[in-house]
Structure formats: structure tokens, C-alpha cells
Image (cartoon, rainbow, N blue to C red):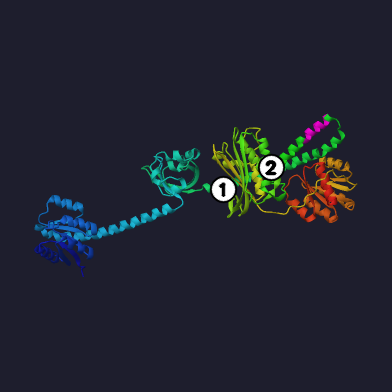
Amino acid sequence: MQNVISILHLEDNVADYELVNALLTENGLNVNITRTETKDDFLHRLRTEHYDLVISDFSLPVYDGKLALSDLQNIHPEIPFIFVSGNIGEEYAVESLQQGATDYILKNNLKRLPSAVQRALTGAVEKRHLKSIELELKEREQFIKKIMDTTPNIIFVYDLRNDALIWVNNSIQPILGFAPDTIIQEKNIAQQLLNPEDHDKFIAIDTWHVPSRGGEVVDFTYRVKNNEGNWRWLSTRSTIFNTDENSIPVQILGVAEDVTAKKELEARFFRSQRMESIGELAGGIAHDLNNVFGPMLLAIPLLQRQLLDDNSKKFLAMIEGGIHRGTNMVKQILMFARGAGTEISSFSPKQILNEIESIIKETFPKSIEINVSVNNETEMIIGDHTQIHQILLNLCVNARDAMPTDGKLTIQCNNFSLLVAHTVRGRIMKPGAYVVISVKDSGTGIPSDILEKIFEPFFTTKSVGKGTGLGLSTVQSILQNHNGFVEVESTVGSGTTFKVYLPSGTIHKHKEIESQSMIPLGHGELIMVVDDESSMLQVAKEALESSNFKTITARDGAEAIALFLKQSNEIQLVICDMGMPFLDGSKTVPVLKKIQPGVKIIIASGSQSMYAEEGLIKDYNAVMLQKPYTVENLLTTIDSVLYSR
């Protein structure tokens, strides 16, 4: 059965209404026509009832067809509208079609009405179908756009001929800081944004200049300048999007991921590896230098006893001073390499800052204003007093050098609580209580491009002869060994602030050996000295024997064990070097203690790696003697070990 066609007929002439109804019915259309002749009734019925078609006279006494068409367009634009009139002119007919009417029929030619109604209804169905498709496509477009705009990656279409972006999603804004509409169609965009080193590579990619075979995918990593002028690394996977008549690519579609953080992490990893290698090299050099300086330090007092003239003593003092300078440099290298030589205790930050203040006020130019303040409630610092002193003095000297004419140096100290884990230059710092000491200058500042390099070993902006470049790398190494960290903020022309974070708390300090007013001498005790450096053995033997001790020397662990087996009951003390070939100290000492558990042990080391030494100190009650050592250090340590003073 044919569906009923519901028609609203705007007509003031009842006869015309009946004629239309009869004509449509006679032509096989199942219609239900409602007549209306006023505006209010017409609008009311449109809003409250359903109609498939509107037929309207062009001219009515109080409401014409043109207004009716306009109202229908506002209420139900999908309903077709046909004019049936006897006085519509050609001009108005064309105008009505332009305004949305489906058709117009003259009353003197009503035979065309049935087919016009059928066309109008068919067209309405097609229109609704197209509208549905259009709506679906629009929804899909919005869905795709939403996906593209919410993805963390930049999606773009790039025109190779004009060097311009022709489309890019909103993700470009959080990554590079550009709004899409400000950068699209911008000419020479690659020239403007790509790093010069990467631009030529990008433009020269072979795939962009050969006939397309379809499916080519190019992976490319490059640097792009953001809206603040900083470089960001992007990793892009791109493919050909459009070609010209010769199949040469003219547009590419790409998806770019921001890999700046990965690149920075990778750089830090390689830098960490490089620093580790340099640290191992520096540690080995320092160990060898300690073996060179050791015999010299021991030999100085022996020569002083024999050379009595003032000129000789003066030259010996100069030599001794040079040796001490060399050993101090070695200590700095060792602290940079391994953060070595720590004597951990708890001490007041006010104490160490008072010391620093006294030094810098006496030595720094008077043109530099110095302000030091410590919060009275600041906790105790846990660390090595000497090394923390070195850190702060190093930072203060750098601050002084950054203010060549005048300026202001401010040092402040406060408590700090780290609530969550904090990553600093690739190291994770644990939450906890810290003391933060800030060293702030008003100097020249550090350019952002070298700010991260300042902690690299041997990197320096100072001229030749003004610095080794080990200062800040040593600072970082010491802090790593103390489970602390350092942060830096700097603005060119406005100064630099270093913030040193050190764990706070209180620990019990080991009882120190009381200083001796006189260098203790021996009472004929037999001491074995084990060292692979023949010069060290010779000078140590001379120093000990001239101080009332008897000695046996061994050049390595194997020789020491063989000699010890013969005289284990007579030997009271063994001074054993840690770094020896064949059989080192960590393997020699346990064997000697097994042979004679009561023998006293002093372990000597120039590397300060501390791992093996800590085990020997704990397991065999050994005492550490750091190389290079003086005769006074040697004799005082021997006295404390033999007599437990």
C-alpha cells in the first residue's frame, strides 16, 4: 500500500484547494492535504504536525507565499515547497527558486503538478540522504581532526615546491609554540625553522626528487627552532602525499615526534660514559703520581738532617713546597675522578661559612660586596668538612672571576626538604632533608648554550693559565659522593646562582688520633714494608730505620708472604701497598692475617678507590694511610697502631 503523502496547502480559495486535491488523487497519489490560509495557523501546523510537502499560492490577502517560503526555510528547510499560482511572474518564479522553492506551477497548467510533486518528494529523499552522508562525513572529519589534535605528535603536509606547510595539526603549538594558522603557507618555512646543518639534508633526500613508485617512507631526525628560539629535536616518519604530472613528489605527509628529551638523555648518557672513562684515566694517573711524590716526601726530612747550610735548606723547602702543590693537585684529580678521600662527619654550616667568609674577605678585591647569611635553625651538614670547604671556595672563586671590576657576592644557607625524587643531570636524588647553600654573583652570567657543559671535565671559559677546567667537575663529583647535588641558574648580564644541596643530620664522629707534640720514634720493632715501587721501598726503609725501627721490604704480595712465613712471630707491623701487580694488597693482607692473626696492618693507597680498603679496615682492623705520606704521617700512624694511642 502506498504511503500517505501529507501536504500542507496554503490557499485562501477553497475551489483551488479542492482542484489540487482531486488532481493529485486522480493521478494515483495517496495524499492527505490540510488547507490553511493564515500565517499563524500555517506556522502553528508546521511546528506541531508532520508534512512531506508544502504547496502555496503566491499571493494571499494577509500572508504571501514568499514569506511562507522564508518561514519554512527557518523551521523545516528539508520540506520541499511548490508554488501553485495564477499570477506569479517569471522574474518572481526564478527568484523563488533561488530562495529555496522546489518548483512553481501555474494554475492554468495544473496537469504538471502531479509529476512536480513526485519529483519534489524524490528530491527531498535524496536531499535527506545526502544530508545524512554530509553529516556523517562531517562527524568523521571532526573525529579525525580531534584525533589529530589530541595526538602528542605533529602531523603535517609539506609542499616541496613552495617550501611551505599547507596543513598542520594543533599539536605543533605545545611542541614548538606556533599556532597552526600562523605558520601555514609561510614561505621558506624549512629555511626559517630547520637547523642549517639539517636543512640541506632534508631538502636533498633522494625520494623527494625521483618519480614516485608509491609507498616510500622516509625516517628523518632533525632540529627545529621553536618560537622562543630554542632547538627541539623532531623524529619524523614521512611519505609522499601528492605528485605532479611526471610523478615527481610535490607534497609529503609526515608525523613528527618530539624526541628532545630522548636526545638530551642520550647526550647525558654519552657524557656520563665519557666522564667515567676520563675518571678512570685520571684515577690511574693520580695513582702513578702519588707513587712518584711518595718517595720525595719521605726523602725531604732525611735530606734536611744531612744538609745544614741555609742555601740547601732553602732549596729543599722549595722542593717540598712544589711536592705539596703536586699532591694537592693529585687530590683534586682523585676527588674529580672518584669523589675519594672522604672523612664523613656532621658539622655546622655556620662554621664552614664563617671560614669561607674570612678567606674571601681577606683575599677578594674590595670592589666586590660580600654578604653571608645562615639561618640559625639550619641543620648540621653530613659530609667531609675539607671537601665541602673546597666546593664552596671553588664556587666563590668562580663568582669572583665573573665580576672582574665590581659586583655583589651573596651566600645564603637554609634547610630544604626534598619531598619527591629529583633528577639532576641523569642522577636520581632521593627525597629527604638537605641543607641548601646558594652562591650568587651579579657577574657576566653563563650563556645557555654552554650551561650544561660547565660540569664537564676540562671544560673552561677561562684563558690559558687561568684554570684547568676541573673545578666544577670536581664539585659535582664530590657532591655525588656525598649523595648531594648542585643546581645552577644563570642569565647573561645578570649573574649566576649555584645551589649546593647536602644531606643534613647528625652522626657520631670516630675518635681521632690525638696530635703528637713530637714525632714518635720506634723501639726496635720489626716492620715489613710491601710496595712495588723500589724507590718507595728504599726511602721508607731509610726513614724507618733512622727512626729506630727495623725493616724488611718486599716488592709484591708473593714475596711478602714468603718472607712473612719465615719471621711471622717477629714482625709486629706490615705496611702494605694496595695497588701492586701479581698479588695486590687486598689479597695479600688476608693471607698474612691468617698466618699471624695478631700482626698489625697499615694499608697504603694512592688511588683512594676505598672499596677494597673498607673491607680490610672492617675485617682485619687495618688502618688506612693515604699516599703520598710524610715521615710525620708515617711515624704517627705507626705509633697509634702499635700502641693504640
Please give the name of the residue rendered at 44% of the width and 40% of the height, measured from the top-left corner: 190
Magenta-tinted stretch: 311-320
- Residue at point 42% right, 52% down? 149
Residue type at mark 1: give it: Leu
Q: Secondary structure at mark 1?
A: helix
> In this orientation, which residue lies closer to the viewer: 211 or 297?
297
Quadrant in which the N terminus appears: bottom left
Figure quadrant of residue 317: top right
Task: Judge from the rendering whether residue 347 lies leftward or rightward of residue 165; answer left or right.
Answer: right
Q: Is residue 279 visible?
A: no
Image position, residue 644 (x, y; %): 83, 52
Residue bearing the label numbered 2: 355
- Given residues 291 and 583, the one toward you in this image is 291
Judge the density around disc 2: few (<14), some (14-19), many (≥20) Cα neighbours within 10 Å: few
Residue 141 appears in the picture as rendered = yes
Q: Quadrant of residue 81?
A: bottom left
> Residue 265: which disc?
1
Task: Tell me residue 255's x, y (percent).
Answer: 45, 49
